Image (cartoon, rainbow, N blue to C red):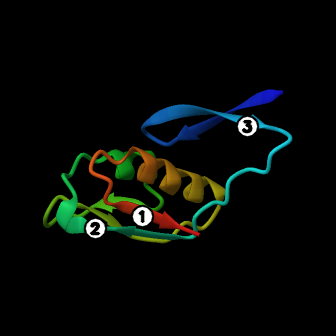
Amino acid sequence: MFEEENRGYPNFCSVKLRTDKNVEKRVIPTKVEIDREGCISCGLCAESCPEVFRINDDDGKAEVHTQPQDDEGKDGAKYAEENCPVSVIKAEE
């Protein structure tokens, strides 16, 4: 009933997602924002999705340097949102 998918996130981890073939996959976000004032500079977002996030050299906080361009970037942004320890990332449809 469930199939496991292996999604690799560059420089960080490999995540297995379980999907039910009878249920549509979730909608992937297209707009990503960070509340930089609340960022604790852990680096999870930049390490898990470098095509969207980076650490600013001046203040050491994460920033969105480009919006997701493909499914991998969108999945990475959603992963970062779901795993940010201070919940400052918003990935919207």
The CA span between labels 1 and 3 is 23 Å
Q: Position of residue 26 (x, y in %)?
A: 68, 53
Q: Dot 3 corresponds to which residue?
A: 19
Residue at 29%, 45% (x, y): give it: 85
Who comes first in sequence, dot 3 or dot 2? Answer: 3
Which is more toward the observer, 68 or 92?
Answer: 92
The CA span between labels 1 and 2 is 8 Å
Residue at 47%, 33% (x, y): give it: 13
Q: Is 9 placed above or below 30 here?
A: above
Which is more toward the observer, 86 or 32?
Answer: 86
Q: Tell me the kind of residue under disc 3.
A: Thr
Q: Are marks 1 and 3 in contact (CB under 8 Å)?
A: no
Q: Tell me the kind of residue under disc 1.
A: Lys
Q: Dot 2 corresponds to which residue?
A: 35
Who comes first in sequence, dot 1 or dot 2? Answer: 2
Q: Position of residue 52 (x, y in %)?
A: 45, 62
Q: Dot 1 corresponds to which residue?
A: 90
